[in-house]
């Protein structure tokens, strides 16, 4: 690993540069610049950091994370492709795309250092834009608390003994400004003696109303590969997610507008406006990005079965779970 990565000293703006294989990354006051053999690209620093923190925290997620229409990662669960233009019809038609494969841990280590160095003290890339400061300007301090935040991953269900805790004022999770009307009462539980650690219930809306992050699904309940991953959303999903499996969405409150395109080319396929109670199955062959005009609650239901990507890739499963 030592020879596949190297960090340079700080530039005139106080930011270090990073190398990962043939990719070079540096930032200035407004932009992140990415160079690779035969090409280059830039992204606004806030947009790049919002995508980067999610790619790191989700360990490259399911399938493809497009930071924008050019740059991103494809998870092979152990190794990861870092690409430029791979899923961009224009780059592809001119054969200008570039991809390199890395051990996931090596790529993540460089991404973590980049995130730490390039995130200023005022900026929290997981927060809604209205709830955080500026990502721009010369380097000012850092925000380790924000960038090292661990994603909630319950073993069975949040709030159970020895599992991820419920949220409270005391634990530093006040009710969000947009969810002040959410009832905070908890259900009564009357377990038979001996079953106190097995029978469990909590106020799911109250739990979500206290989320301090946006567009960051947390695993709040798990039964084998079935993961219930609720999240609170505000403004735009900072990545364009290319699926390698079907994802179910249940809109719990407010409204999200989804732009849905072909996963490989980006050609537009649909717009879905989801209102409270709406359910959607996002197909396995699309990319999507959500826009939430006001903070909303979304339940993402993931199937973490590691065999799924190959079944879809080999067309042994249809990309859509239902036909109407
Ligand atoms: C998704 O790509 O399916 C996704 C990611 C983050 C969210 C919601 C949905 O907060
Ligand atoms: Fe998705």
Image: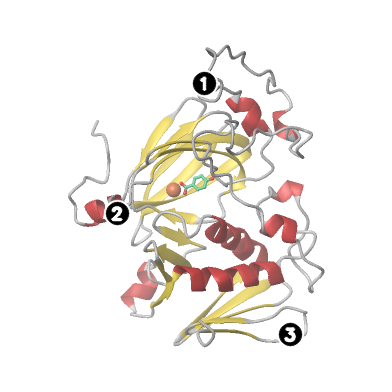
Dot 3 corresponds to which residue? Answer: 11
Secondary structure at badge 1 equals loop
In the rendered image, the vertical position of residue 73 relative to residue 171, given as above or below: below
Point out the tag, 1 or 3, that comes first from the N-terminus: 3
Q: Secondary structure at mark 3?
A: loop
Q: Residue at x 78, y 56 (%)?
A: 133
Indicate left or right for 132 with 321 as reference: right
Contact between labelled residues 3 and 1, with CB atoms less than 8 Å apart = no
Q: Is residue 56 left or right of residue 288?
A: right
Q: Nearer the viewer, residue 159 or 88?
A: 159
Q: Which residue is under mark 2?
A: 309
Residue at (62% x, 40% y) in the render? 293
User: In x, y percent, where is residue 104?
Assistant: 46, 68
The residue labelled by disc 1 is 199
Badge 1 local density, few (<14 within 10 Å), some, or many (20+)?
few
Residue mark closest to the camera, 1 vs 3: 1
Q: Quadrant of residue 45?
A: bottom right
Left or right relative to 221: residue 94 = left
Q: Is residue 42 above or below residue 289?
A: below
Q: Nearer the viewer, residue 90 or 311?
A: 311
Under circle 2, the secondary element is helix
Q: Earlier in the sequence, mark 3 or mark 2?
A: 3
Colour setting: secondary structure
Task: Establish if 90 lies above or below 189.
Answer: below
Q: Quadrant of residue 12?
A: bottom right
Q: Which percent across, then down, holds residue 226? A: 39, 38
Kindly report the distance in space between the C-alpha atoms of the residues bearing marks 1 and 3.
Answer: 56 Å
Q: Is label 3 within 8 A of ligand 1 (CB to nearest ligand atom)?
A: no
Marks 1 and 2, the one that precedes in the sequence? 1
């Amino acid at each position: 690993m030592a020879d596949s990565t190297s960090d340079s000293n700080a530039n005139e703006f106080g930011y270090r540069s990073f190398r990962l294989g043939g990719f070079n990354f540096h930032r200035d006051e407004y932009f992140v610049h990415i160079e690779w053999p035969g090409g280059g690209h830039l992204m606004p620093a806030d947009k790049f950091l919002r995508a980067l923190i999610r790619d790191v925290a989700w360990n490259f997620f399911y399938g493809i994370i497009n930071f924008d229409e050019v740059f991103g990662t494809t998870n092979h669960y152990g190794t990861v492709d870092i690409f430029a233009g791979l899923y961009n019809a224009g780059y592809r038609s001119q054969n200008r795309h570039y991809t390199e494969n890395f051990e996931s841990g090596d790529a993540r280590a460089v991404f973590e250092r980049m995130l730490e160095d390039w995130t200023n003290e005022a900026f929290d890339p997981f927060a809604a834009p209205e709830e955080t400061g500026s990502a721009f300007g010369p380097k000012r301090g850092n925000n380790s608390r924000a960038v090292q935040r661990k994603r909630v991953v319950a073993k069975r269900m949040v709030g159970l003994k020895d599992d991820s805790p419920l949220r409270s004022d005391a634990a530093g999770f006040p009710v969000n400004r947009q969810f002040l009307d959410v009832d905070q009462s908890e259900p009564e539980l009357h377990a038979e003696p001996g079953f106190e650690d097995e029978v469990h219930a909590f106020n799911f809306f109250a739990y979500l109303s206290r989320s301090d992050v946006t567009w960051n699904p947390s695993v709040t309940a798990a039964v084998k590969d079935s993961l219930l991953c609720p999240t609170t959303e505000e403004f735009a999903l900072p990545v364009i997610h290319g699926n390698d499996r079907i994802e179910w969405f249940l809109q719990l409150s407010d409204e999200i507008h989804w732009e849905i395109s072909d996963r490989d080319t980006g050609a537009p396929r649909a717009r879905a406006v989801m209102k409270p109670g709406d359910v959607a199955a996002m197909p396995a062959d699309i990319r999507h990005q959500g826009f939430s005009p006001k903070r909303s609650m979304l339940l993402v239901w993931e199937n973490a079965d590691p065999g799924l990507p190959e079944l879809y890739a080999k067309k042994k499963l249809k990309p859509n779970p239902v036909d109407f």
